[in-house]
Image (cartoon, rainbow, N blue to C red):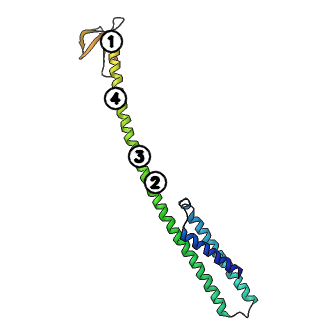
Amino acid sequence: MKSINRFKKITAALALIATFGLGQSYAQTAPKKMEKEAKKTEQKVKEVKTKASGTETKAKAAPAKALEKKDAVAKEKSTQAKKATETKAAQVETKEKAVKKEATKAAETKTAQVETKEKAVKKDVTKAQKQVSAVKKDAVATADKATSEKYNGHTVYLGPKGGKYYINGNGNKTYISDKK
C-alpha cells in the first residue's frame, strides 16, 4: 500500500512538471531527465507488481478481482506517466528547434556584417597602396634631378653619382645603361 502511495506521488509530481514545464535552461537536458524518470517509474511499477505477486502468495484468500484492479491501476498510472513524458519531450523538441533557428539567424547576420567590414577594409587597403606608390614616385623624383629625356615613355632622372634611371610601373628605379 505504501509503494502505491509513493507511485501516486511520483506521478503527481510528473504531472505538475509537465503542466508547468521546465525553463529554457533545461531545454537540452530535459529529454534525458524525462527518459530517466520514465525508466524509474517503470521500475517502480515492476517493483509494485513483484510486491503484489509476493502478497498474492502470502494471501491466497484475496479475490481475483482485487488483483486485476491493482494491475489495471498500475497500468493506467504507467501509461499516464508515459504520456506526460512524451508531451514534455515534444515541448522540449519544439523549444530546441526555435533556439536553433534563432542561433542560425544570428550567425547569418553576423557573417553578413563581417563581409561588409572586410569589403570596406579591402577598399581602404587599396587606397593606401595607391597613395604609397604615389608618394614613392614623388620622393624619388624630388631627390634626384629630372632631365628632359624620355625613355620608353618615362621621364629620365639623373642620380647622385651621375647614373640615369626612370621609374617603372611598379614605382621602382630602373637604371639605363649608357651603351647604345
- Of the numbered discs in the image, which one, if any, rests on residue 142? 1
- The image quadrant where one finds the C terminus is top left
Q: Which residue in the protein does label 2 denote?
A: 103
Q: Earlier in the sequence, mark 4 or mark 2?
A: 2
Callout 2: few (<14), some (14-19), or many (20+) C-alpha neighbours within 10 Å? few
Left or right: residue 95 compared with residue 171: right
The disc label shown at residue 111, or none: 3
**Near-viewer residue (156 or 39):** 39
Q: Secondary structure at mark 3?
A: helix
* Number of marks drawn: 4
Q: Which residue is at the far top?
A: 162
Q: Where residue 138 sits in the image (x, y, percent)?
A: 32, 16
Report how far apart the C-alphas of labels 2 and 3 lie in the structure. Answer: 12 Å
Cα separation, mark 1 vs mark 2, equals 58 Å
Question: Amino acid type of disc 3?
Answer: Thr
The secondary structure type at the circle numbered 4 is: helix
Seen in the picture, residue 101 relative to 131 is either above or below; the reply is: below
Q: CB of mark 3 within 8 Å of CB of mark 4?
A: no
C-alpha separation, residue under disc 1 versus residue under disc 3: 46 Å
